[in-house]
Image (cartoon, rainbow, N blue to C red):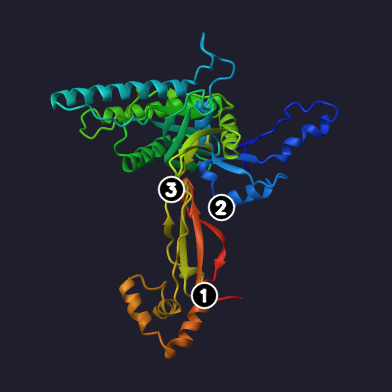
Amino acid sequence: DFPESDLANDSSNSAGGGEDGEEEGDSYMDFPPAFAIPGWATLDSTVEALIDAAGSSSGCGPSLHQRSIAACVGALVPPVGKAAQGAAAPAGSKLQQLLSETMQSKDAAAAKEEAKEAALARRDPGEVDPFVPLVLLVGVTNEGIEMTAVQITKPQGPDKELHCPFGNINVISSVCYAHGGNDPLSMVLKALDELREQVGIVVPESEEPTAIVTYGSVGSQKQLAKAVTSVLTKYGKEGENSDDYDGWDEDIPIVSTGKGCVSMGLAVLAASVHGRVKLVVSVKGTDGKLRPKAKLGVAVQDVATCAVAVSFNYFGGAENKWTEPKVIFDFDRRVPAGPYQIDFTAAECAAHLANGGKGIEDESELIEKAKNLEGSRGIPDREAAALKCRFRLYQKTSRGGGAEDDSEWIRVGNDMKPLSME
């Protein structure tokens, strides 16, 4: 059940008028849908259910996007019908203007400092790296909370692509929690602490966030902004006398968005995926000639909002014999990611089985005992162990531990038998 999810269907028949108005009014169902999924709900079962339920006669499956990223794109879309006086193109959104002004001022300051240092060193000024703004996207509902940190780059003028003022969104980290009956705002401090820590690990060179964007209902945004400001004030007081202070404080601008922000951003993302919103750039070929090539209006580099783990059982699936889940894809892993290879040998399984308990944890001990079970004498033991070997997959969308924050591992699918066939 996704009461807070948004669905966008791209259709050229918005009015459904004409002689066959009734038929035309339903024609939007023939187009591929798009879903904005909360980060705390991006489980394998959710994704498969949406793909199965959203089949369309067009032959294309649905496009799935994290809700916070849809909110980011929606917050950057220029307001409809509002244009600067004397300008041909609409004025940018509040977020776009803030990012553009900050990038220009930071770049100008960096260039000035480089010129000053070059003059003192009696050399030509070098190129300075463009400023990359960090933006936090924060949303809360009765079902869950999600906080996402992104870096936004590649400004695009309205003559290139009006709907996408920036061409690249690089997701740094996403912290999500299902409330589980708790006060929706009670997790703001915990989630923001974790997001701040992850940003410091992944992009330690980044400055404090240029803006914090809230999305959702008007009431929830007001409460969320108040709670976030309280946490930022705490950060500022704690960092007053610290040499490692990262600049996170109550002076960071908080930008609210309209109720349809997520839906608008989702429509733009879906249009970009299906080539309806694109840019034409010149690409140099192997012969040195420039040729036109289409690219996405906005490119998103996503990270995983859930962790994936495996557990092993060498005793025919006995419930008290499963190993502790071993993480193979952690939170914030860049996606899409390649396959993860797990090697099983019947000799190793036989060594685990002979050892009792849940198996052998020491790798060198496992290798030594597995060697003793190789050869013709070990065939019966290896066959018996292969038939009893099982493993299962788990996922979780909340970090940390404890059932109170819904961070328990969730089992995915049925147990698998990698060394035997039925």
In front of the other: 247 or 1: 247
Residue 224 position within the rendered picture, expressed as x and y whole percent measured from the top left: 47, 28
What secondary structure is marked by label 3?
loop
Q: Which mark is residue 419?
A: 1
Q: CA distance from mark 3 to mark 2?
A: 17 Å
**Relative horizontal placement of residue 247, taking residue 308 as reference (left or right):** left
Where does label 3 land, which residue? 334
Quarter occupied by the N terminus: top right
Give the amino acid at mark 1. Answer: Leu
| Residue 387 against residue 115 in the figure, above or below | below
Q: Residue furthest right?
A: 19
What secondary structure is marked by label 1?
loop
In front of the other: 91 or 94: 91
Quarter occupied by the C terminus: bottom right
Residue 92 position within the rendered picture, expressed as x and y whole percent measured from the top left: 49, 20
Q: CA distance from mark 2 to mark 1?
A: 24 Å
| Residue 259 against residue 45 in the figure, above or below | above
Residue 225 position within the rendered picture, expressed as x and y whole percent measured from the top left: 45, 26
Q: Residue at x 51, y 75 (%)?
A: 419
Q: Residue furthest bottom?
A: 377
Give the amino acid at mark 3. Answer: Arg
